[in-house]
């Protein structure tokens, strides 16, 4: 968030991002890193589905939505999958 100059402004930008992401995908979000840094954040996004194809599609939509935010520069992203326990 190179143009952000206060924590208050950062929270405003994050709130707008979370609203945008949640409008395209039913996900849960949480800021998990850099909470006290003005121009940087680490955001976790979680979702559950019985279909890996649906998960991949939703993740790509979330990444694309983030990249399209003018006030945000996406530096990196990663994906982790949890497998269901075997019966």
Image (cartoon, rainbow, N blue to C red):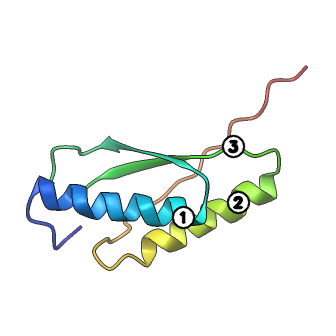
Label 2 vs 1, first from the N-terminus: 1
Q: Residue at x 52, y 58 (%)?
A: 22
Q: Are marks 1 and 3 in contact (CB under 8 Å)?
A: no
Q: Position of residue 52 (x, y in %)?
A: 79, 52
Secondary structure under tag 1 reads helix
Question: Looking at the rendered structure, which numbered label has been put on residue 56?
Answer: 2
State whether residue 71 is above or below residue 26. Answer: below
Question: Looking at the rendered structure, which numbered label has been put on residue 48?
Answer: 3
- Seen from the viewer's position, the closer of residues 54 and 86 is 54
Question: Looking at the rendered structure, which numbered label has been put on residue 70?
Answer: none
The quadrant the N terminus occupies is bottom left
**Lateral position of residue 47 relative to residue 17, left or right:** right
Q: Gap in Å between the C-alphas at discs 1 and 3?
A: 16 Å
**Lateral position of residue 6 relative to residue 48, left or right:** left
Q: In front of the other: label 1 or label 3?
A: 1
Q: Gap in Å between the C-alphas at discs 3 and 2?
A: 11 Å
Q: Residue at x 16, y 50 (%)?
A: 37
When asked about the image quadrant of residue 8, the answer is: bottom left
């Amino acid at each position: 968030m190179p143009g952000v100059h206060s924590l208050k402004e950062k929270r405003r930008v994050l709130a707008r991002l979370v609203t945008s992401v949640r409008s395209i995908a039913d996900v849960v979000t949480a800021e998990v890193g850099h909470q006290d840094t003005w121009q940087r954040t680490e955001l976790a996004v979680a979702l559950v589905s019985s279909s890996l194809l649906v998960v991949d599609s939703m993740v790509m939509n979330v990444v694309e939505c983030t990249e399209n935010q003018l006030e945000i520069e996406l530096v990196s992203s990663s994906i982790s999958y949890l497998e269901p326990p075997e019966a």
